[in-house]
Amino acid sequence: MAASSLLAPALSSSAKATLETSPKALVDEVWQIINREFISYDFNQEEWLATRTELLKQDYTSQEEAYSAIRKALKDLGDPYTRFLNPQEFEELSNQTTGELSGIGLRLEVNSQTQVLTVVEPLDNSPASEAGLQTGDKILKIDSKPTTLMTVEQASELIRGEEGTEVTLEVSRGIETPFEVTLKRAQVEVPVLHSSLKQEGQMRIGYLRLDEFSSHAAEQMKKAVEKLEADKVEGFVLDLRGNPGGLLFASVDIARMWIENGPIVRTVDRKGGDREFSANRTSITNLPLVVLVDGYSASASEILAGALKDNKRATIVGTRTFGKGLVQSVHPLSDGSGLAVTISRYYPPSGIDINKKGILPDIQLDSREEIPTALKGTGRDEQYARAVSVLSNIRLGQNRAATSGGLATTQQQ
């Protein structure tokens, strides 16, 4: 903080008072965070100091004017990941990273045949599941508002709200008379991991699709892997396709579930300070693993894939990853908005800078068509089929090695 104050021009007491009670306070709050933490090869602090002078010269009649000025100043930094979030955007990002939201815990869709708002599933341990809502239930009204012609987004907006408040749904189930149910909103954990047991020929495979690295991702991964191990799977496919990333610590925790020893990732801030994360002998399985990636696998996905590849713990299948080798910190601001700022670079165990380059899979296989989520991990998914082939070959090699070892023992006897 001392360095920041030395770089900032002095303000009179009256100017400080004005600043603290105007949108300028928010503008300067953002400026100070960038000045203190932002990392970029071409960041010029003298130019940034001049930017502060220009920003504080302006008169802002509303928060929106301040937001606009902030966005323009951040755009000039040339970093797409350093961005301002208005209060609604900041709340959405917070829900995403925490893996929780305030609502009743329903996955909804507009049924393609009936065009009726329909329950896909109630989430576990949610007000919806506790109230007995079921897959296939039709939502006719939300707080007396008909859902006809509503999009899923519009319906979700009505259903979500502050924890402890209530929402009333009119529900139709089969041939029963429609009924009303009133639910109290609560913090609901959103599942980001989807797991299943696949019988592929003679082989039992654990399929894990991770949507993002939320604060609950590691705990959901641990439960899924342990359950599939108990189900006697012989290998795993971890699907990171389309996963944009999330929390760095979640990726490290998940890497440690698969890697017993070895480096995972190294981060370096603008002062040259680095931090290394390594496996800590807490892996929960040593079964063969194949990881699926694509051009949308980014950030924390690349940290995990890079660690697994460089430690030769997994075979990576798919296409080159996105190439985001930067780490952001998210700051809440005084008016409920937020700021995501790039604070460090990260490097996989190989030490290669993957930013704008990505990670090259061990087996490069481009899907001939985009795979809908519903078809991922099925026979119509070419990349998954290749993953199954890799696991089958690993098992075949293990069986041959075991048989060869057995024969050698017999000969010695």
Image: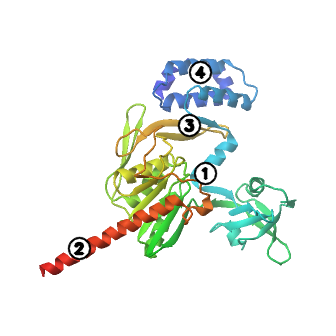
Distance CA(mark 1)–CA(mark 3): 16 Å
Q: Which residue sits at x=50%, y=31%?
A: 38
Helix, strand or loop for disc 1: helix
User: Circle 1 sits on which residue?
Assistant: 96
User: Circle 2 sits on which residue?
Assistant: 404
| Sequence order check, earlier mark of 4 and 1 | 4
Q: Nearer the viewer, mark 1 or mark 3?
A: 3
Q: Which residue type carries mark 3? A: Tyr
Q: Which residue type carries mark 1? A: Gln
Distance CA(mark 1)–CA(mark 2): 51 Å
| Sequence order check, earlier mark of 1 and 3 | 3
Distance CA(mark 3)–CA(mark 4): 20 Å
Image quadrant of residue 176?
bottom right
Q: Is residue 16 left or right of residue 405?
A: right
Q: Nearer the viewer, mark 3 or mark 4?
A: 3
Disc number placed over residue 81 in the picture, else none = 3
| Sequence order check, earlier mark of 1 and 2 | 1
